Image: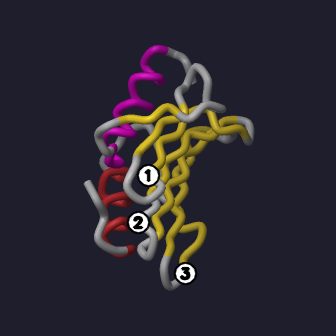
Amino acid sequence: MAYLNINEFQDVIFRESINWKFGQIPILIKLTLSSIKIRIYLTSNSFIDSFFNETTGHTSFALIKDNQRILGINNTGNSWHIHPFDNPAIHKPIRQEVDYKKFLKVIENLIKENKI
């Protein structure tokens, strides 16, 4: 899903997060005229950061644990890539866009597999 503006992005993040059983209530971390960053804590040392820039279309979802990204999916304009769970330092191109709901599903599966 390509987000049209900051309000739409915020609405999706808040709606999906509130309905998701593994995270806490979303927190607005940063808001400017063109970008937004929202955080959802999973535990005291892990959280999801979601970022969107309305001007560039940049979208980013990251799972952070112990202050390290352990999984990420980014759109840097027109192309999507993943920072895989098993090697988050690499950029692996992916063909389809990933929306927030799909990202939560990936994290949910990692939780159920006791990987995080």
**Distance of label 2 from label 3 (alpha carbons):** 14 Å
Q: Residue at x 41, y 45 (%)?
A: 80
Nearer the observer, 51 or 74:
74
Q: Residue at x 38, y 67 (%)?
A: 10
Q: Which mark is residue 75?
A: 1
What residue sits right under mark 2 in the picture?
57
The relative height of residue 28 versus residue 2 in the rendered view (above or below) is below
The single residue placed furthest to the right in the displayed view is 67
**Distance of label 1 from label 3 (alpha carbons):** 19 Å
Mark 3 is on which residue type? Thr
Residue 4 magenta-drawn? no
Mark 2 is on which residue type? Gly
**Whether label 2 touches label 3, CB < 8 Å:** no
Residue 106 magenta-drawn? yes
**Distance of label 1 from label 2 (alpha carbons):** 8 Å
SS of the residue under disc 3:
loop
The relative height of residue 88 versus residue 64 in the rendered view (above or below) is above
What residue sits right under mark 3 in the picture?
32
Where are the magenta residues, as a range?
98-113
1 vs 3, front mark: 1
**Whether label 1 touches label 2, CB < 8 Å:** yes
Mark 1 is on which residue type? Asn
> Residue 111, how many percent across, how many down?
47, 24
First in sequence: mark 2 or mark 3?
3
Nearer the observer, 39 or 83:
83
The relative height of residue 113 versus residue 51 in the rendered view (above or below) is above
